[in-house]
Amino acid sequence: MTLAHKDQRNFIRMEVNSKVEFKRGDSGPTLVGTAIDISAIGLRFVSEEAIDNEEVLSVTVYPGAEVTPPLHAIVTVKRVDHCEEEGTYEVAGTLKMA
């Protein structure tokens, strides 16, 4: 039995609305964003900071429930879309557990 879903990816995305903290590499200031969705291998979030394609970020996703611990991961950025009206950037990348 297979699950039918409209996305043609190998993993189903789960919509989330969670706080994301991230750093460029291992140093620098902690920046904040909001997660949009997450899958077994990817994360998409919104940031007010400009991010470059192929940039590597250290990311923590806070689920919003104290029962579930935060997710710590490394994200390699694969796509950045600038929303000029909002002054934000939609960042999508691949996840690797930290």
Image: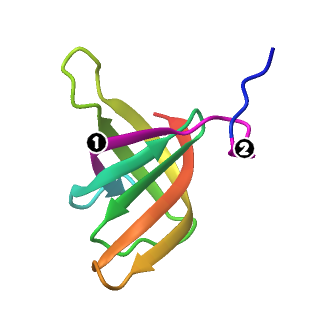
Amino acid residing under circle 2:
Arg
On the image, numbered disc 1 is attached to which residue?
18
Dot label at residue 55: none
Q: Kindly state the secondary structure of the residue where label 2 is placed.
A: loop
Of the pair 88 and 3, the residue shown nearer to us: 3
Q: Residues within 10 Å of mark 2 (few under 14, many from 20)?
A: few
> Viewed as shown, does residue 1 lie left or right of 64?
right
Where is residue 2 shown, x and y percent of the image?
A: 78, 21
Please check the rendered image and state whether residue 13 is part of the magenta-colored stretch, yes or no: yes
- Give the image quarter of residue 39: top right
Disc 1 residue type (three-letter): Ser
What residue appears at the point 31 percent right and 64 percent down from the top-left corner? 47
Mark 2 lies on residue: 9
Residue pictured at 39% horizontal, 55% vertical? 45
Q: How many marks?
A: 2
Q: Where 89 sits versus 30, above or below?
A: below
Q: Quadrant of the N terminus?
A: top right
Going by the image, does 20 lie left or right of 82? left
Q: Secondary structure at mark 1?
A: strand
Outermost residue on the right side: it is 1
Q: Assess whether mark 2 and mark 1 are in contact (beta carbons under 8 angstroms).
A: no
The answer to whether 38 appears left or right of 27 in the picture is right
Q: Residue at image x 32%, y 39%?
A: 61
| For residue 10, above or below residue 82 | above
Stretch of the chain drawn in magenta: 6-21
Where is residue 90? Give x, y as percent: 42, 66
Give the Cα distance between marks 1 and 2: 22 Å
Decide whether residue 25 is among the magenta residues: no
Image location (x, y in percent) of residue 92: 51, 58
Mark 1 or mark 2: name the one nearer the start of the chain.
2
Picture quarter with the C terminus? top left
